[in-house]
Image: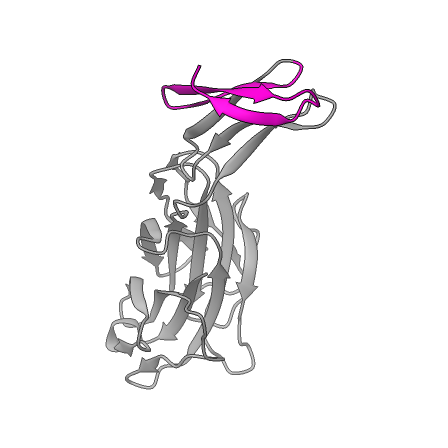
Amino acid sequence: DLLVVGLAFEKGTDVAITPPSGWTLILRTNQSSNVGYATYRKVAGASEPASYSFALTNSPKWSIGSCAIAGSDTTTPIDVHNDASGVSGNPSAPSVTTTGAKRLVLAFYANKKPATLSNYTSPAVERWDAPNTSGGLPANAMASYEQPVAGATGAKSATISEQAEWVAQQIAIAPGASVKRFLWDVNQGLPQLALERDANNSPIRRYVYGARRISQTAGSDTSYYLHDGRGSVANLTSS
C-alpha cells in the first residue's frame, strides 16, 4: 500500500517539519505565516508501526490525517499535484491535469479556524474532516474521487462553516503497472473475457469468440485456440 499523510498546522511559513524516516514530501502549501499544509508519502513495508511522529518547530497547533492506497505505482506514485491558498472564502483545490486514465485524486483542505467542511465539488467524497473545535486546532479535511480519463480534473472546492485563511491541494495517484482492467462480454451464456487493459487503459489483449473462444491478439500478434472433443482448450498456436 501507499501511505499518504495530510498535516495541517498554524503559523505557516514559520514552521519547519521533520518527517519520520522513510517519508517523502509530496507538497507543502503555506498561506503566509497563518496556516500551512504538508502532504507526505511512504510505501508500506511488510511491517509498519502503529503510529508515526512528525516534528514541528515553533509549537503550532496542528491536526493530521492518513490513508492507505492499494494498487499504486510504488516507484513513482504521484502523477501530478497542484495547490492554492487564500485569506477568506471557501477553500478551492486547483485543477490538475492527469497523464493517464483511472487516476485516484485526493483533495486536501486546511483552514486556520476549527471549521467543518461540506458540499465538496462532485464527484469528490469526504474521507475525513477533523475540525478539532474543542482545542481550537486548524481544520483538516480530505476528499477523493476517480478521474476516468487523462486531462484536467477541474478545481474542487468545499463549503466551510467559518471562513478564515485557508490552503488546499489536489494530488493524483499513479496506478501500478501490474494493475489490469477487464471488459466482459455478457452476451454469451456465461460472461466471457473480451478485452484486457493496463493501468493507463491501453489494450493488452483482445479476444474473439464464435461458438467458443477463437483467438487472442496482443499487439500485432494473434494466436488461435485449439479445442478437444469436449470443447476444452487443448492448445494455443500462431496459425
What is the x, y in percent for residue 189?
Answer: 74, 23
Residue for point 31% across, 72% down? 22
Q: Is residue 233 magenta?
A: yes
Residue at image location 29% in from the left, 65% down from the top: 25
Identify the coloring: one colour
* Magenta highlight range: 211-239
Q: Nearer the viewer, residue 17 or 194?
A: 194
Toward the viewer: 7 or 177?
177
Secondary structure of the magenta portion, mostly? strand
Residue 5 lies, in percent from the top left, at: 42, 67
Magenta segment includes 100: no
Residue pictured at 32% horizontal, 70% vertical: 23
**Residue at point 37% right, 23% down?**
219
Which residue occupies the extreme bottom position in the image? 59
Rendering quarter of residue 89: bottom left
Residue found at the far front of this picture: 229
Q: Is residue 161 visible?
A: no
Left or right, 150 with respect to 188, comes to left
Q: Position of residue 167 (x, y in %)?
A: 37, 61
- In percent of width and height, residue 221 lies at 38, 20
Position of the C terminus by quadrant: top left
Give the quarter of the image for residue 33: bottom left
Q: In this image, 102 relative to 169: left or right?
A: right
Q: Is residue 189 visible?
A: yes
- Count numbered badges in the picture: 0
